[in-house]
Amino acid sequence: MQDRRNFIWKVASAAGLAAFSPFIQSAQGKNLKETIERSAHRDASDVATDEDFWYLIQQAYTVSPNILNLNNGGVSPQPKVVQEAVEHYNRLSNEAPSFYMWRVLDQGKEPLRAKLAEIAGCSAEEVTINRNTTEALANVIFGLRLKAGDEIVLTKQDYPNMINAWKQREKRDGIVLKWLNFELPIEDNERIVKEFENAFTSKTKLVHITHMVNWNGQLFPAKQIAQAAHRRGIEVLVDAAHTFAHIDYKIPDLECDYLGTSLHKWLCAPFGSGLLYVKKDKIKNLYPLMAAGDPESEDIRKFENIGTRSFAIEQAIGHAVNFHLMIGAERKAKRLFYLKKYWTDKALQIPGVRIGSPLKPEFSGAIALLQIDGIEPVELSEKLFSKFKIHTVGINWENIHGVRVTPNVYTTLNDLDRFVAAIAEIAKK
């Protein structure tokens, strides 16, 4: 087991956090550190159900006690230590911008790259920092050397921004998009892999895999699909917006060539932060979205030529990593699945309620799709907020219809009991 004491120290002192973090110095912060230290050798499954432990995690956030946010799938709030870091670095930058931004804070970029590579399980020379999944994947989609007639396999359940990016390449360059259209949920990996394999031809150049479908939380077997693709010489691009720092894995586990994710989702990093992974031997032939001095460089940094950026957001990512490490990736993944299972088990006892998501841990995580017979998704989402002040999102997208429900580490069982009571009242009427 990794040394939790070391993680606690990182949260308290990395990059001088202790010097400017009121939360770390507060009684709540000290209590949280002590509790995690005492839990260092407990089994992750045991901690996942320890409500006292997670109540202290909730106190590390500034979420509203009145509006229940169950739409963390869109963007997650940041813990106090991350918010305080953004404020600190922003104030520092404004003292003398060109000095503190480029000569001081920019010195933290390479250590941050190494920190992200550590939790990603890959080389720091394969990781680049950007603003979100869309930007990360756009570098790949528009940087690949494709020509008219080349085929790309993707699904109707992929994220709209990525679908639109591929459609633009189709219109501009004459590539061919081969669409799969799944009826989800599916708890059969062999069936999913087979559908992808059946779409591969001698003209297929790349397969686009959404690791977790954002609409309903379906987890696709990215590794098995990648293996099937590589046997045919097909490259693999993974959209990991909803699995990075959510599901416990390392990027090389997926055996992909390219991967993009948003750090402001499950890592709880500052809004507008993301990560692009490009396997080392793929960097040279991938053109950057923003022009670099040498577009055929083998240096991963060629994908970071965006001009002036937010140094405050960038440097605060490191504190989000520390907070994630403090909780522990395995503990976090088990807690997130436990929260989904807790409320779905109760909701399925209510007449007229269905769940449009996989319910087994090998096919899902925290995200689940609520369906109530006779109520349209948007109407249901509006009812939940107007009467119960529970924030969700109605989904109507390519065979997926329902209300997406996404708790996070700060969500308590009391919160979910409140949610289930609201479901019961709405379903009864």
Image (spheres, helix red, strand yellow):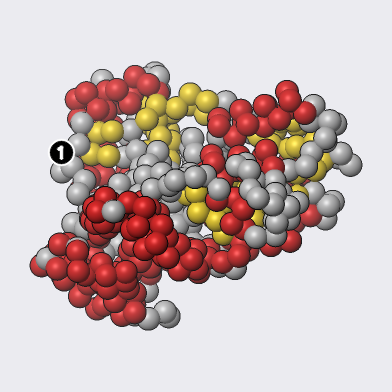
Q: Amino acid at mark 1?
A: Asn
Q: Quadrant of residue 423?
A: top left
Whether residue 366 is visible, yes or no, is: no
Q: Residue at x 84, y 30 (%)?
A: 148
Q: Quadrant of residue 382?
A: top left
User: Does 281 appear above or below 385?
Assistant: below
Q: Which residue is mark 1?
A: 66
Rendered location of residue 182, percent (x, y): 64, 33
Report whether 196 appears left or right of 76. right
Whether residue 274 is visible, yes or no, is: yes
Q: Residue at x 67, y 39 (%)?
A: 141
Report whether 40 appears left or right of 314. left
Rendered location of residue 74, percent (x, y): 40, 38
Give the secondary structure at mark 1: loop
User: Does 35 appear above or below 88?
Assistant: below
User: Does 334 appear above or below 404?
Assistant: below
Q: Residue at x 19, y 69 (%)?
A: 19
Q: Quadrant of residue 66?
A: top left
